[in-house]
């Protein structure tokens, strides 16, 4: 079974500063995918970034980067130059990539980020 | 690409009533997923479809829950004899599978918020 742990229930960050959101995972699979989603108060889950377990380089998408440390089973999200619109819940998730698993996602409990002006 | 749409956005019902939610995935997406999210938690997988076939159901999906995707396009999730513990956000997601897919990103709708009184 897969498990995602996000130990930071909430955090404040000053506008224009960088913030790191922690995520650790547990799996016995060799092949898996790691995701970060943002959920604003509107409720929609917005995809931010993806990292495959065999990807050698850390993923980046604009202001988002994923610090993937496979041996430590961590997949932290770094948001650079925070903006007021970044205030939201952030969820780390993982999937099993073999076909029979259906690519369904297992989510962590989330971290609420509030950006201060 | 009009995104994943869910209807209704909000539903208030009395305990014991039946409710039905609808999800319209992105048109070319063959996989459709249902998740449930309770307050302060991450989404939990309920079930998923590959075209019209329901391939997996979570043990969270009790006998009172049924999901269909009759023509491989839109899907419905019905809850019979609702209980207060069914109060949650019900999220639908979709994705395409097959050649050319570079990652496993799920596209989520804005969800249906169910309140059982």
Image (cartoon, coloured by chain):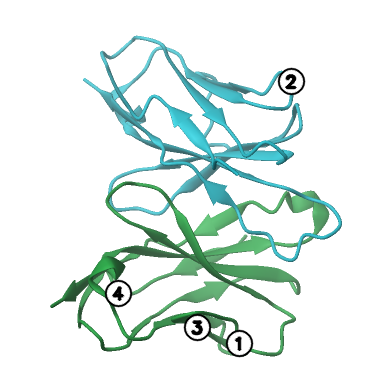
**Residue denoted by label 2:** B71
Instruction: Give left or right: position of A51 versus B77.
Output: right
Circle 1: is it few (<14), some (14-19), or many (20+) Cα within 10 Å?
Answer: some
Where is residue B111? Give x, y as percent: 41, 37
**Residue denoted by label 3:** A65
**Residue denoted by label 1:** A58
- Say if labels 2 and 4 share a chain: no
Q: Is residue B48 visible?
A: yes
Circle 3: is it few (<14), some (14-19), or many (20+) Cα within 10 Å?
Answer: many
- Dot 1 falls on a residue whose secondary structure is loop
Q: Nearer the viewer, residue B47 or A67?
A: A67
Instruction: Give left or right: position of B109 versus B89.
Output: right
Q: Nearer the viewer, residue B94 or A105?
A: B94
- Which disc, if any, is residue A3? none
- Which disc, if any, is residue A8? 4
Vertical placement of residue B7 versus A55, above or below: above
Q: CA distance from mark 1 to mark 2?
A: 40 Å
- Dot 3 falls on a residue whose secondary structure is strand
Q: Colour of chain A?
A: green
Q: Colour of chain B?
A: cyan
- Say if labels 3 and 2 share a chain: no
Vertical placement of residue A114 versus B7, above or below: below
């Amino acid at each position: 079974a897969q498990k995602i742990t996000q130990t930071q229930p909430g955090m404040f960050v000053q506008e224009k500063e960088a913030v790191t959101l922690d995520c650790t995972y547990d799996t016995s699979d060799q092949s898996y995918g790691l995701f970060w989603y943002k959920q604003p108060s509107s409720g929609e889950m917005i995809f931010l970034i993806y990292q495959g377990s065999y990807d050698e380089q850390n993923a980046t998408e604009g202001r988002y980067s994923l610090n993937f440390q496979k041996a430590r089973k961590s997949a932290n999200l770094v948001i650079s130059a925070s903006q007021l619109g970044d205030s939201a819940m952030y969820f780390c998730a993982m999937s099993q990539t073999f076909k029979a698993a259906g690519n369904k996602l297992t989510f962590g409990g989330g971290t609420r980020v509030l950006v201060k002006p | 690409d009009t995104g994943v749409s869910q209807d209704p956005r909000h539903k208030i019902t009395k305990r014991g009533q039946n409710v039905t939610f609808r999800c319209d995935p992105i048109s070319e997406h063959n996989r459709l997923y249902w998740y449930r999210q309770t307050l302060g938690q991450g989404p939990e997988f309920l079930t998923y479809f590959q075209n019209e076939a329901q391939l997996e159901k979570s043990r969270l999906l009790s006998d009172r829950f049924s999901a269909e995707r009759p023509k491989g396009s839109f899907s419905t999730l019905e809850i019979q004899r609702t209980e207060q513990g069914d109060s949650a956000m019900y999220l639908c997601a979709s994705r395409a599978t097959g050649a050319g897919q570079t990652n496993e990103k799920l596209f989520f709708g804005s969800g249906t918020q169910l309140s059982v009184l």
